[in-house]
Amino acid sequence: MWHLPREVPRVPRHPFAAKRAKELRADLTDAEVILWQNLRFDLPGRWRRQEPIGRYICDFVPYRSRLVIELDGDQHFDSAHDQIRDAFLRSLGFEVMRFWNEEVYKVLDEVLETIYFAVQDRSPPSSDPPPLP
């Protein structure tokens, strides 16, 4: 089986983060399941879920757009740890977008629209020829 070349080089993974990410993929929250289904089927790009970047695990990442999508519950309210993590991810060229779990439940279309426009803004120009008339 052959694989397409990676669009953007990945950041080295911390061994613990890679193992923990695999565990988290098997135990997504309800909000993560809802968003994951919509991201992978309705939005452009190749999405990864529970993706290790350095020693951190990001909820959703389309590498080509250098975007990190995080879903947060109440435990993340004004978290100093999240600020340090976001600064690390920004230092690597990622934009971090955070949404509350409740937003996924109540205004999913708005969340998806916000993510869609962020992906469009951050994606490199396509090398595909324009469509025929």
Image: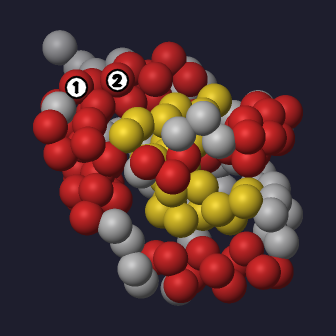
Which residue appears at 34% of the width and 67% of the height?
29
* Identity, as a three-letter code, of the amino acid under mark 2: Thr
Q: Residues within 10 Å of mark 1 (few under 14, many from 20)?
A: few
Above or below for 62 versus 18: above
Quick one: label 2, few (<14), some, or many (20+) residues within 10 Å? Answer: few
Residue 100 locus on image (x, y percent): 37, 40
Q: Is residue 60 left or right of residue 44?
A: right
Q: Mark 1 and mark 2 in contact? Answer it, CB < 8 Å.
A: yes
Under circle 1, the secondary element is helix
Residue highlighted by disc 2: 114
| Nearer to us in this view, 44 or 49 | 49
Quadrant of the rendered structure where residue 133 is? top left
Q: Position of residue 94 (x, y in %)?
A: 69, 34
Asked if residue 114 lies left or right of residue 86, the reply is: left
Q: Which mark is residue 110?
A: 1
Q: Amino acid at mark 1?
A: Glu
Q: Secondary structure at mark 2?
A: helix
Residue 45 appears at what percent x and percent y? 43, 44
